[in-house]
């Protein structure tokens, strides 16, 4: 099991920024639970791509993006990480398709909907 700690850092307008830390926890029996596959929804965002970079060392990770393909900058930042394109926050079937396609043990939602 993972324990995520979210610490508010600051607020810029309507956007709240936070620092996310995680660590492995042991179960009540003292045995580590095996989490192998993690998918992060919103991989192109500030929080999502950083979380993927941190988790990549310990887990099999994948991410979702709303675009039909990642741009060159994102592709470099998430090198070696599988990305599921065309996943929309308001389209449950696209989210389910990504989660089922990755066979995720853990889903982390980092999708941010911002008024523009």
Image (cartoon, helix red, strand yellow):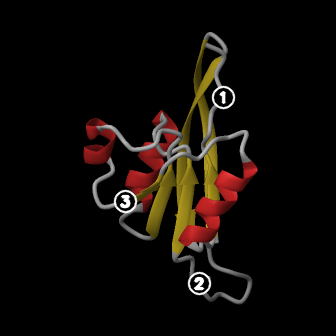
Instruction: Report the Cα–Cα distance between label 2 and label 1.
Output: 35 Å
The quarter of the picture where the N terminus appears is bottom right
In the image, is 62 to the left or to the right of 81? right
Q: Is residue 25 above or below residue 28?
A: above
The x, y position of residue 9, in whole percent, is 56, 27
Residue drawn 54% across the image and 65% down it: 38
| Residue position for label 1 | 113
* Residue 2 seen by the camera: no
Figure quadrant of residue 57: bottom left
- Marks 1 & 3, CB-CB < 8 Å contact: no
Residue at the farthest top position: 13
| Residue position for label 2 | 32
First reached walking from the N terminus: tag 2 or tag 1: 2
The quarter of the picture where the C terminus appears is top right
Q: Is residue 98 above or below residue 100?
A: above
Residue drawn 72% across the image and 45% down it: 91
Point out the frontmost of discs 2 and 1: 1
| Mark 3 burial class by Cα count in 10 Å: few <14, some 14-19, many 20+ | some
| Residue position for label 3 | 81
| Mark 2 burial class by Cα count in 10 Å: few <14, some 14-19, many 20+ | few
Badge number at residue 42: none
């Amino acid at each position: 099991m993972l324990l995520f700690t979210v610490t508010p850092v600051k607020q810029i307008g309507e956007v709240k920024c936070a620092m996310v830390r995680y660590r492995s926890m042991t179960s009540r029996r003292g045995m580590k639970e095996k989490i192998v596959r993690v998918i992060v929804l919103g991989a192109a965002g500030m929080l999502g791509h950083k979380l993927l970079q941190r988790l990549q060392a310990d887990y099999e990770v994948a991410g979702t993006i709303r675009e039909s393909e990642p741009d060159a900058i994102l592709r470099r930042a998430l090198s070696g990480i599988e990305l599921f394109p065309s996943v929309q926050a308001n389209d449950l079937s696209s989210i389910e398709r990504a989660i089922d396609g990755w066979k995720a043990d853990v889903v982390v939602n980092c999708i941010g909907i911002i008024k523009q």
